[in-house]
Amino acid sequence: MPSTQLAIAAAIAAVALGLPPGELFAPSDQSDQPHSISVRALPTVAALFAGGDVSQDHTCTASVVSSTTGDLLITAAHCVSGNGKGMKVVPGYDAGDAPYGVWPVTAVFVDSAWRSDTSEADDVAFLRVARTVVGGTMRRLQDVTGANTLGDTPAPSTSITVQGFNAGRDDHAVSCTVGLDMTVTDPTFRCGGYVSGSSGSPWLATGADGVTRVTGVIGGPDEGGCTDATSYSPVFAANTAALLARAERSGDDGDTAPDAGPASDCS
């Protein structure tokens, strides 16, 4: 998601309330707008390191999605390029710590419409990761972190929680819970503090059955939005489920994702 200038306002507000840097994200002149807070990441929410060096900045967010193979995450397609090899994910990343290990990406899966023309309606990708030694044992990702079930875009006003990472390092996740909105046909999340790096952050909705589903990711129009206070997602429906099913049966024989380039409509 394209970056906006929040740092000065956040720092001033944090000092005024005696909070450490990063603990408050709301600009003082937008106090009536919901804003993200700094939290410890869920085990299923991962910082994505496009360059593969986990001592450097993470650039996007991914989350573990329930799969028959137990090794898949979902993110925004514009966060990835090429075959994904060399990228790494760190679930539950917290202030530089990797409590659930560091997982190398082995394959990327994107829709054919994204491969042909980076269609914003198909700004979704699945990542496969290799098994990794955690606690002295070779493990599957899903067995270590748990996973969220893939779901469809819910009805407007459904309560969703969006948790992810703004670009950087040695930081905490940000989180906000509000009702889902729609801008024409685009799922919309109105909460401040989601800037560059939050692309791919999961939109989590817990149903009456107690199951938490990932029903969107920050992405789609303008790579997720032109301001920190309004974020978008592609619609999740049958095509998203079909892409997950293809990822489950394809092993490491993934796709070559194109470079999305800059968001075109943001001034």
Image (cartoon, helix red, strand yellow):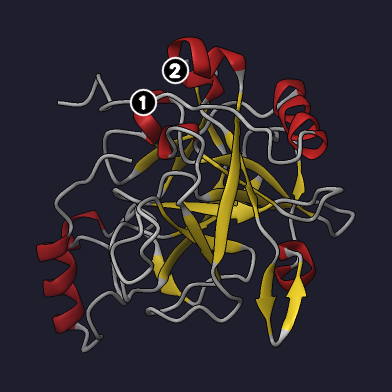
Q: In the rendering, which numbered label is found on residue 260?
A: 1
Q: From where the camera sits, is residue 91 visible?
A: yes
Residue pictured at 20% horizontal, 78% vertical: 14
Q: Check the image and name the residue furthest to the right.
A: 209
The N terminus - image quarter: top left
Amino acid type at mark 1: Ala
Query: What is the secondary structure assignment of the residue under circle 2?
Result: loop
In the rendered image, residue 137, in percent from the top left (x then y), is placed at 75, 81
Residue 208 sits above or below residue 254 on the image: below
Q: Amino acid at mark 2?
A: Thr
Disc 1 to disc 2: CB gap under 8 Å: yes
Query: Is residue 161 visible to us here?
Result: no
Q: Nearer the viewer, residue 148 or 190?
A: 148
Q: CA distance from mark 1 to mark 2?
A: 6 Å
Check disc 1 and report its element: helix, strand or loop: loop
**Residue at the (70%, 28%) spot, across then down:** 240
* Residue 260 position in % (x across, y down): 36, 25
Residues 106 and 233: in front is 106
Toward which corner of the image does residue 52 lie, by quadrant?
Answer: bottom left
Mark 1 Cα shell of 10 Å, populated few (<14), some (14-19), many (≥20): some
Q: Quadrant of residue 261?
A: top left
The residue shown at (76%, 71%) is 139
Q: Quadrant of residue 10?
A: bottom left
Q: Residues within 10 Å of mark 2 (few under 14, many from 20)?
A: many
Residue 2 spot, x, y in % from top left: 26, 39
Q: Nearer the viewer, residue 15 or 233?
A: 233
Is tag 1's residue or tag 2's residue first in the polypeptide sequence? 2
Q: Could you tell me residue 24's position as x and y percent? A: 29, 72
User: Tag on residue 185?
Assistant: none
Q: In the image, is 179 to the left or to the right of 189?
A: right
Q: Which of the numbered marks, if any, corresponds to residue 118? A: 2
